[in-house]
Image (tube, rainbow, N blue to C red):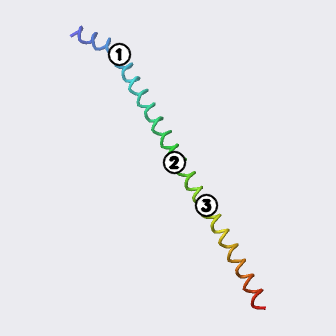
Amino acid sequence: MLATVIAASSSWPDAAVAIAGVALVGSVAVVVVWQALATWRARIAVSREEAYRKLAEQTARDVQEINDRLTELEVASR
């Protein structure tokens, strides 16, 4: 019985090192996935902002064209 207790107590440091190793690998994996998702979200945000910018530019051109046509119609109707 004493040999079992001694064997169990001598394997605890090995188990602690193994647990710490698993925790370290798990932590690194979580950080890598987290950063990959953050990069993906940033890319999506940039593409969304670019699409909004293009839409705003097109809207500004359309509004300018409408104003030009209204001005032409006002001049023609006089």
Picture coordinates of residue 5, whole percent (x, y)? 26, 12
Residue mark closest to the camera, 3 vs 2: 3
Give the amino acid type for the residue marked by disc 1 in the picture.
Asp
Give the amino acid type for the residue marked by disc 2 in the picture.
Arg
The kind of secondary structure element at disc 2 is: helix
**Badge 1 density bin: few <14, some 14–19, many ≥20, Cα 10 Å:** few
Residue mark closest to the camera, 3 vs 1: 3
Give the labeled residue for mark 3.
54
Question: Do the residues under discs 3 and 1 have CB atoms within 8 angstroms?
Answer: no
**Badge 2 density bin: few <14, some 14–19, many ≥20, Cα 10 Å:** few
Give the labeled residue for mark 2.
41
Q: Which of 35 and 64 is in front in this view?
A: 64
**Badge 3 density bin: few <14, some 14–19, many ≥20, Cα 10 Å:** few
Give the amino acid type for the residue marked by disc 3 in the picture.
Lys
Residue at point 41% right, 31% down? 26
Q: Which of 14 and 33 is in front in this view?
A: 33
Picture coordinates of residue 31, whole percent (x, y)? 48, 35
| Residue 14 marker | 1
**Of callouts 2 and 1, the N-terminal one:** 1
Residue at point 40% right, 23% down? 21
